[in-house]
Amino acid sequence: MKRILIANRGEIALRVMATAQRMGIETVAVYSDADAGSAHVQQATQAYALGGLTSAQSYLDIQKLLAAAQATGADALHPGYGFLSEDAGFAQAVQDAGLIWIGPPPEAIRQLGSKAAAKQLAKAHGVPCLPGYEGDNQSDARFAAESERVGYPVMVKAVAGGGGRGMRLVERADQLVAALASARSEALAGFGNGALLVERAVKNPRHVELQVFADAHGHVIHLGERDCSVQRRHQKIIEEAPSPAVNAELRARMGQCATALAAAAGYVGAGTVEFLVEGQQFYLMEMNTRLQVEHPVTEALTGLDLVEWQIRVACGEALPLAQEQVRFSGHAIEVRLCAEDESFQPHTGVVRFFSAPQASAFTRAPLRFDHAVRNGSEVTPYYDAMLGKLIVHADTREQAINQLIHALGQLKVLGLPTNRAFLMECLNDSVFRQGQALISYLAGDAPRLQQQLRQREAQAHQQWSALCAVGQMPGPLACSYPQLRKLRHRGDTQELQLQPQTAQSWSLQAKDEEPVLLQIDELLPHGWKARRGGLTQTVNAVAMDAEDGSSRWHLQAGAVDWWAQDVSYQPPENAGGAAQAAELRAPFNGRVVLLNAELGQALAEGAVAIVIESMKLEHSLSVKAACVVEAVLVSSGQQVSPGQVLLRLAPMPEVKHD
């Protein structure tokens, strides 16, 4: 193997390149028009332009990828994860083109890539499965009958793909039809396959997966488990190993089932068998026939390079270790840094300031940061919202948690919302610290964690947002009179009297409070080291324009991220008479996949008016109060941008009684 084409983008492309280059193998990057300036393009030995913006026009176009391999002289192809990594047809096409496919055999992908087929194979080899239905009859009526047989609650799942897409929890029979429609739509958009299955829902399990590896000589081993129970939208954000709930006996039983399933499918390469675990019982969820996003957790614990193993196995080599030779050391935790807000909605935008903690990249280390982020990186609506992964390896779980919180505190990403602060809140929460986080953890506790964050944001806003205002004011020689500034955060407007004292200090007085001295000790490229009263703080910030043309800042201080807007020159809210009609706006870039509103239509409070697909997921936009649609400004299939007005809504007219 002399040259590997990596049919992927971002951090996983860089991850494969790091190992390949260490092994003396050249690499080929492919890229869409949206990724022309990306880090993986610059890091590769060669780069080939696929063209197009969307996944379908680039990274999912098999013929373009094969043409790229031929044009660049690649003799092997690594699919990364996502995109075509679990597409049996693609694997076959790569092999038919005379290339080495760094992945499992196409037939194994076919058997295991379908959750339905995987469950049937698992049952035949004694792997525990939940009762359910995975048959060919995909009618709503059949699913309704099978759900009644299994008993509610049930989980609707896409047969193809993964990543939580096409998955819906159904508590009651009257929710089933809507859940089936939504899951089908999301599965079709994400995987090109709308087939579904239904199985009994386990309400409070853990999500524990086994890393398996097999070679072409009949050897199959496992490399331990990863606990991936901390999830939002059925997608993992924190993964750790070992699991706080898995002992040696349970690990051995799960490992035996995982390797038996892989062997039964004739598997070769890296794979992950995912289980629901409740107490000492476990049930198969699915098998992912690829390298996982969270593979660095296993690399940290075992000291192995799983990408190197993939390459060597693809070249026909035997596994370098037998099961009894696998050793585990310490505790490892990974968090996924994503461009999303506190409600877990993905966001697009430009990274205006980025500073990472001192860490290794793409290799085992006490602190590892796999990412492809730079100052000026753009997060587009075409791909996943994940920015990177921070991984800590320490002697104990407590040490790993503390070190990861510290590293996240040193990380600075400004210009668009991220889940950095939320991850810190999760890691420091007593539920997680005590090893009690189940799959249901964030479904129940996210509102509490979000409220704690909002309280810290409000406090930081009161203490430090004035730094944005004083940065615009003239020095004391130019104007010594006090000036009024109004700074808004989440609807809370802080009115401040600011009076210069020296070139770097101001008297700061909020309404009904005593004056306090605000002093800047050091100007930073993106922020300040400042003192307020007896408190000293480093505050990082970038200035941005708000939609109304006013000044807006993204600020970060320690474990808090917040946004502040200068509304000093805006008229008071509700000024000018009666309130105007409400508007439903797009929260982010996306495509309208369902328009559930017509001109003049009455909508009840909470009704879903529009569904937007963004970053491979569907998001429902609901109205906050009963209303009448006054104007429809978009159509189904239309691409929309953040802040764009989609509907104008008028209050529901009062019913007059004679």
Image: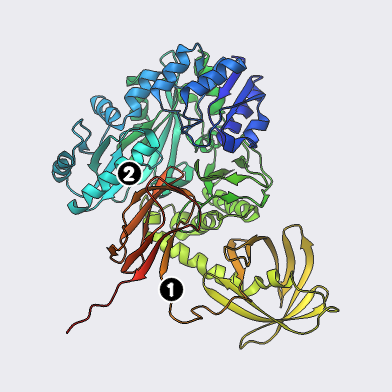
Looking at the rendered image, the quarter that the C terminus falls into is bottom left
* Amino acid on which disc 1 is placed: Gln
Residue 567 pos. (x, y %): 61, 73
Residue 33 pos. (x, y %): 58, 35
Q: Is residue 282 visible?
A: no
User: Viewed as shown, does residue 653 lie left or right of 350?
Assistant: left
Q: Which residue is mark 2?
A: 167
Identify which residue, 424 or 585, lies in the foreground: 585
Is the residue 91 above or below the residue 387 in the image?
A: above
Identify which residue, 478 or 86, lies in the foreground: 478
Point 48% across, 12% down: residue: 97
User: Viewed as shown, does residue 249 lie left or right of 517?
Assistant: left
* Number of the label disc, if any, that sits on residue 580: 1
Rounded to the nearest whole Å, what is the CA distance between mark 2 and mark 1? 39 Å
Q: Is residue 116 visible?
A: yes
- In primary-sequence order, the first of circles 2 and 1 is 2
Residue 577 pos. (x, y %): 46, 82
Q: Quadrant of residue 625?
A: bottom left
Is the residue 550 above or below the residue 89 in the image?
A: below
Mark 1: give few (<14), some (14-19) or many (20+) Cα within 10 Å.
few
Q: Secondary structure at mark 1?
A: loop
Point 32% across, 29% down: residue: 114
* Amino acid on which disc 2 is placed: Met
* Number of the label disc, if any, that sits on residue 377: none
Mark 2: give few (<14), some (14-19) or many (20+) Cα within 10 Å.
many
Q: Secondary structure at mark 2?
A: loop
Point 74% across, 69% down: residue: 471
Looking at the rendered image, the quarter that the N terminus falls into is top right
